[in-house]
Image: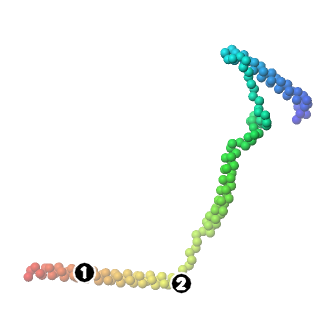
Amino acid sequence: MLQQTGVSRDQLREQIRQTVRDAQIAAEQAAKDAAKDADREGVQSGREIVIGVPPTGNPPVFTGTGVQINPENMIPPQAETISIAFFITVAAIIIGFPIMRAIARRIERGAPVAAPIPLEVRDQLTQISQSVEAIAIEVERISEGQRFTTKMLADRNREASRVSPGQ
């Protein structure tokens, strides 16, 4: 890429050094201007402006996007939430997959087919059904006989009550 722009490495280094020098001079000038402004506003003179220097140890790393990354704390705060969600998802898949498979197999099989009734049991049920119908007919005859008897007794009592008062 340097060959395309026609700039050598030494020239590029010199340009970077010059830019850093210009920035230092501008910072010193800004500090002097700030001190003059502070004196005009009644703030005590002799006060120095301190430009913070990163602590010793691992210096912060600046990415191309302007985001500062501190090497001592490389794990972002959202990583814990994301990892918990990941493990919960994996657990749900491990537990849920066999359950879903079992449900799918059950649906695929359909409703269980009823076992056919043996011929002997069918004959016995038919016989019981006929017996119950015969009993119902006999009970109806008995109840008809009771109604007739009750009606006869009621008529007899009425006739007896008409004849008794007149004598």
Depth order, front residue of 126/106: 106
Q: Which mark is residue 126?
A: none
Is 117 placed left or right of 74 in the picture?
left
Does residue 104 show up? no
Can you tell which quarter of the image residue 19 is in? top right
Give the colour scheme shown: rainbow
At which x and y percent is residue 141? 33, 83
Residue marked by disc 1: 150
The residue located at (45%, 83%) in the rendering is 128
User: Mark 1, residues whose alpha carbon is within 10 Å: few (<14), some, or many (≥20)?
Assistant: few
User: Mark 2, residues whose alpha carbon is within 10 Å: few (<14), some, or many (≥20)?
Assistant: few
The residue located at (77%, 23%) in the rendering is 27
Does residue 114 show up? yes
Q: Amino acid at mark 1?
A: Thr
Residue marked by disc 2: 119
In the displayed structure, would residue 158 be above or below residue 12?
below
At which x and y percent is residue 123? 50, 84
The residue located at (65%, 59%) in the rendering is 96
At which x and y percent is residue 94? 68, 59
Quarter of the image with the C terminus in it:
bottom left
In the displayed structure, would residue 11 be above or below residue 45?
below
Depth order, front residue of 3/141: 3
Q: Amino acid at mark 2?
A: Leu
The residue located at (80%, 24%) in the rendering is 23
In the displayed structure, would residue 101 be above or below residue 35?
below
Is 34 placed left or right of 145 in the picture?
right
Is 104 placed left or right of 131 in the picture?
right
